[in-house]
Amino acid sequence: MTALSTTTLTLTMPRLGETMEEGVIVGWLVEPGQQFRRGDAILELETDKTVVEYPALGDGRLDGTLVSAGDRVPVGAPIARVAVLSAGDWAAALPGGAETEASPKTANTTKPPSILAMPRLGETMEEGVIVGWLVGEGESYARGASILEIETDKTVAEVPALSDGRLLRILAQPGERIAVGTPIAEVEGEVEEEAATAPATKATAVPGAVPAAAAPVDSGADTPAPERRSDGRLRATPTARRMARQRGVALETLHGSGRRGRIERVDVERAAGSNGPAPADLRWLDTPAGRLAYAQAGSSGPVHLLVHGFAGDRTAWANLASGLARAGRRAVMPDLPGHGATAIEAADVDGLAAAVTALAESLPGPLVLVGHSLGAAAAVHAARRLGDRVARLVLLTPAGCGPKIGAEFVHGMAAAETTGEVSHLLRLLGPRGGQLSDAALAAVAREMGRGRLRTLARALATPDGRQRIDLLRPLAELAERIPVRAVFGLDDRIVSATDALNLPPRVAAHFLPTGHMPQWDAPREVAALIDEETPHG
């Protein structure tokens, strides 16, 4: 390309939807100085409705970036400089390009109705799959409301209404693969100009096409492991990345069913629906009490042993474990006795601590031991047994530091048998507690319905919420020889943040604006606190 004449252009934040006003740079997929071809993904963007890889509109080279990952950028603001072979290919992406924004038309309130066509969500998009309609026939909607969800080869996006209107008739059903510009619905209200003049013909389904959520997945051992890009990032569709963040699934623990091991949406749905990674990704440790299941993110670096709380499992650490792995750490996440895939049962904290101790002794040390809620109690007792194998101890919303605990959650989860019970109880954990999919809720309800946690619940708290475990004395002993810090959520409805007032003087207390699951609500902040080495002495 260097021997050819090029034109230098300034790329701006694209408008990926009619109501989009700004976007967040998730990451650059091309480095400055690196060449790209038409259709190659240059960067990943996040809006309030989707995460999408932005493709190159023509061959070129990235000369320099003007914004960084995490920056929130208004539509039309400069984001990069590129050298391109043909400026004409990029006309739609340049300021003033007539194709970058569809001009709203006056609402057509008379017959015939407006025709909503399959929109072009990217310059290289040629077809899309209807994931589902978010508005029913005959229902009215407001401007900016999502009408339907569409899946392309690069993303899943919600299509917003250009004006107030009403959905009159659906012409394309979920699962149908539709060419761009083909009618998909009749509506009252504004639509894109080319859609308004399109003939009202029925969209045709491609034989064999199925909704992405229902696509069959081969769960056999021959499924390829996810391939990484040249920059070390896992190969995963933007849809899979977004869904993994929403459902708390660590991409590193999944096998990709897509081309060259790429992680697809259905891989994440399978993991979330089964309450964890595919069994092929589990590891097992033989202990005197039985086999202990655990998962791992990252293969080298300092070991961080992450111990989940009551009624949780290894997947509670998904986001945090992914961050630690990207930072060069090795995160190990067991299913405690009585939880998840581990068949061992435990009647009290000592049983949990014995399992944590056995796993820790099988790992290279010294390690960082992290415990959440009831898992914090197990971590404290394990740390006393492990001696100098523990470099530091981090407790997240720890049980056992005050007189009261949320008995409604503890005894409610132990006795839950239906998705409705589980759904209401999980909302007590914080804002993300109510965001699990129906499949994930059903999996949790099935697990709770086995009754494995009822004895452990009685060992943790009385029916009226009095705690039956006390960590303050062992914490005081541990804090004399290793750094210990505790993190509390200011909006925690299970463990009160005021329990921090009871901590021994040498235990550092930190407060975050989260609920009971700071590793869900603030994974970056928690990762920083876990990884920060505090001088001790």
Image (cartoon, helix red, strand yellow):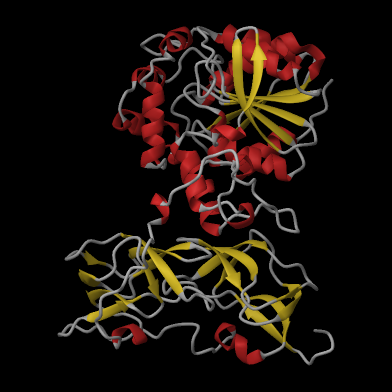
Residue 49: image location, x then y, percent: 45, 61
Relative height, residue 340 to residue 351 (above, below): below
Residue 269: image location, x then y, percent: 46, 45
Q: Is residue 165 left or right of residue 401?
A: left
The residue lying toward the viewer, choosing from 185 and 212, is 212
Q: Residue at x 62, y 39 (%)?
A: 320
Q: Residue at x 72, y 88 (%)?
A: 85
Q: Is residue 273 visible?
A: yes
Q: Is residue 389 left or right of residue 210?
A: right
User: Quadrant location of the N terminus?
Assistant: bottom right
Relative height, residue 302 to residue 138 (above, below): above
Relative height, residue 433 to residue 108 (above, below): above
Q: Is residue 478 left or right of residue 147?
A: right
Q: Is residue 246 visible?
A: no
Residue 16: image location, x then y, percent: 49, 72
User: Quadrant location of the C terminus?
Assistant: top right
Residue 184: image location, x then y, percent: 30, 73
Mark count: 0
Dividing the picture into quadrants, the one containing residue 10 is bottom right
Dividing the picture into quadrants, the one containing residue 141 is bottom left
